[in-house]
Image: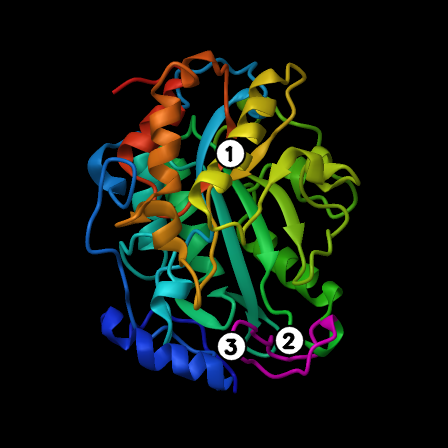
């Protein structure tokens, strides 16, 4: 079916759907490729977890020197930035606080200090547009929403910049080796014959409609960009990577350091490691590598992981359970302790359900207080 991009929310349900939805998953019944129909937002929060709006930092970059390499900063970010809907398995799909559809959630994140975003798109409307998805679940937002809200934020805060990782989400296409039909955890584009060239063509159409919004060297389509200084990137979105559904790096887009053959050496993303102690240990090692780097390289660390439906989901990993301490709290403990005081910077840190104090602890490495 063709999915029209839009912002209609179809209702809510509670975590009580978990048992029925897990049975559905085990039976292999496909979720609809439309809007998410259930919500399992966390019922508790802490300064480290699910308390995004506890403090605001809309202009934290403004006082930093223009000459700083973006790679030398500590940048709070969100993993699966607009994943606020969960279909029949909300505890497995939702990864961020729900502050509204149509990218209203992005507004809340940017105001809180988030500057790195992870945007996952499905091709819709007969190969003419991008809709925001978390695998097969539509997130009641489209790429126009993302760009419109980012543009408005940057117009109001012109000394800020936004780092964007853009990812084609649908791996069920025939061109990706899939069946051409959506299923649990796998979306298909419209059409399911979508190719790399099609995704690039669609992205180029957005660039034409939003001239000057992106940092130009990162979206040439012909060559990738050197790591910019903050002064060069102010007022723009910097495209860090543009990738396809099975990890293809689309040439001519993004930052050279993050799109070359050794890009993986700068990234920690063990997303199936749901033992929170082990996950934080892996993340902390990459943050330490970022701190030790003096060449302006951009390290990226994911605090997120997901082992649902038979293990912890994103909220359980980030926020913990009655018998585990969440990764977000472990990170906050470290960053505000004696070990964190030794870090010069953390690089980009992408989080699920970030809390205001965790964002603040990252920004403190940039000299930002309050």
Q: Could you say which is closer to the camera, residue 174 or residue 100?
A: 174
Judge from the rendering whether residue 269 lies leftward or rightward of residue 256; answer left or right: left
State which tag comes first along the sequence, 2 or 1.
2
Q: Residues within 10 Å of mark 2 (few under 14, many from 20)?
A: many
User: At 64% from the left edge and 80% from the top edge, which residue is drawn?
Assistant: 191
Mark 1 element type: helix
State which tag comes first along the sequence, 3 or 1.
3
Q: Depth-wise, is mark 3 or mark 1 nearer the camera?
A: 1
Q: Indicate yes or no whether the magenta region holds residue 25.
A: no
Q: Quadrant of residue 206?
A: bottom right
Mark 2 element type: loop
Disc 2/disc 3 C-alpha distance (Å): 10 Å
User: At 60% from the left edge and 56% from the top edge, which residue is drawn?
Assistant: 167
Q: Quadrant of residue 245?
A: bottom right
Residue bounds of the magenta highlight: 176-194
Q: Residues within 10 Å of mark 3 (few under 14, many from 20)?
A: some
Circles 3 and 1: CB atoms closer than 8 Å: no
Q: Could you say which is closer to the camera, residue 284 or residue 366?
A: 284
Up the image or down, 248 lies above or below 15; here it is above
Q: Position of residue 181 (x, y in %)?
A: 61, 84
Residue at numbered disc 3? 184
Residue at numbered disc 2? 172
Q: Position of residue 100 (x, y in %)?
A: 28, 58
């Amino acid at each position: 079916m063709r999915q029209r991009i839009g912002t209609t929310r179809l209702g809510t349900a509670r975590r009580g759907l978990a048992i029925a939805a897990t049975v559905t998953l085990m039976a292999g019944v496909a979720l609809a490729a439309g809007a998410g129909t259930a919500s399992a937002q966390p019922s508790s929060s802490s300064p480290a977890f699910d308390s995004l709006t506890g403090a605001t930092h809309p202009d934290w970059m403004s006082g930093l020197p223009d000459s700083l390499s973006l790679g030398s900063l500590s940048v709070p970010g969100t993993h699966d930035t607009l994943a606020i809907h969960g279909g029949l398995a909300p505890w497995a799909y939702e990864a961020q606080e729900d502050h509204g559809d149509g990218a209203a959630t992005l507004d809340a994140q940017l105001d809180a200090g988030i500057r790195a975003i992870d945007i996952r798109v499905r091709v819709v409307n007969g190969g003419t547009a991008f809709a925001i998805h978390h695998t097969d679940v539509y997130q009641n937002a489209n790429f126009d929403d993302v760009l419109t809200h980012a543009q408005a934020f940057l117009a109001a805060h012109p000394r800020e910049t936004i780092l964007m990782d853009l990812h084609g989400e649908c791996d069920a296409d025939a061109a990706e080796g899939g069946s051409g039909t959506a299923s649990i955890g796998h979306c298909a584009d419209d059409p399911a014959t979508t190719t790399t060239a099609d995704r690039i063509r669609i992205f180029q159409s957005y660039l034409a409609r939003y001239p000057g919004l992106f940092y130009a060297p990162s979206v040439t389509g012909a060559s990738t960009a050197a790591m910019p200084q903050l002064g060069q990137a102010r007022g723009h979105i910097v495209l860090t990577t543009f990738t396809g559904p099975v990890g293809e790096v689309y040439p001519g887009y993004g930052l050279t350091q993050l799109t070359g053959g050794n890009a993986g050496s700068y990234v920690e993303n063990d997303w199936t490691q749901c033992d929170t102690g082990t996950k934080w240990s892996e993340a902390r090692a990459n943050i330490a590598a970022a701190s030790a780097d003096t060449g302006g390289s951009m390290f990226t660390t994911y605090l997120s992981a997901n082992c649902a439906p038979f293990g912890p989901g994103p909220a359980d990993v980030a926020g913990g359970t009655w018998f585990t301490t969440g990764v977000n709290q472990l990170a906050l403990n470290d960053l505000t302790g004696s070990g964190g005081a030794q870090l010069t910077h953390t690089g980009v840190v992408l989080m699920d359900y970030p809390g205001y104090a965790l964002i603040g602890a990252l920004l403190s490495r940039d000299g930002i207080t309050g």
